[in-house]
Amino acid sequence: MTVGITLVLADGALLVADSRQTRFLAPGAPYGDDSIKIRRVGKFDVATLSFGITEVTRVAVARLEAKVVNDVPPEALLALASTALDSAWRELLTKKSADVDIFHPNATTAIAVAGVASGIPCLVGALVRADSATGNLHFRSPALSTARYTWLILGPKEQSLMEKYFGDRVRL
């Protein structure tokens, strides 16, 4: 699972991530250490950092990139990131094989978008996971912050980083 950090600065944002990639939907498949998890969105000063199921985040990031054709305000980035992640998850549900356990504790996806949107340094986050109690997708409310030094850290659940840090600073 990805370890990633984003930080809003006075004139932009810092995004850092590991490069390990495992394939949740292909158990036993070899992992790779050359995954690019931070991608610039078009020619704009914002980038995405994706966490979780590669087969979902790859689709979500591509959809977000396709929608951001102009410099948009942070609130628009929030809506676009949330919609992209939602639609990518719903697509996965229609294509996954029957033996894939989407209720597994590691079946969580998130996208952080950070940078300068319409001249405003910002951080946007969207997170989705399948809820085994209800059998539905659980969307945490997407988050937006323009406050300087707002940070977001996501990492392995075994270390409880998602709840310990992410919940304290940017509420999803």
Image (cartoon, grey):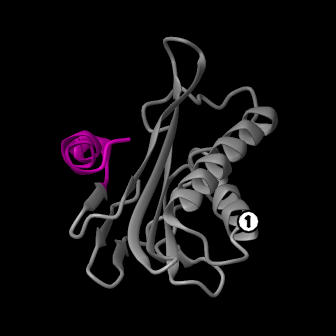
Q: As displayed, is residue 34 above or below residue 100? A: below
Highlighted range, magenta: 154-172
Question: Looking at the rendering, in which quadrant would you find the C terminus?
Answer: top left
User: Residue 41 colored magenta?
Assistant: no
Residue 107: image location, x then y, percent: 51, 37
User: Residue 158 colored magenta?
Assistant: yes
Type of secondary structure dominating the magenta stretch = helix
Give the farthest residue toward the right: 94
Give the farthest residue toward the top: 133
Of residues 94 and 147, the one nearer the viewer is: 147
Of residues 39 and 3, the one nearer the viewer is: 39
Q: Is residue 102 left or right of residue 146?
A: right
Q: Is residue 147 left or right of residue 110?
A: left
Instruction: Say which amino acid is labelled 1.
Output: Lys
Residue 158: image location, x then y, percent: 26, 41
Helix, strand or loop for disc 1: helix
Q: Is residue 107 left or right of residue 3?
A: right
Which residue is pictured at 23% across the width and 47% down the height?
161
Examine the rendering and report whether any part of residue 91 can be seen. Answer: yes
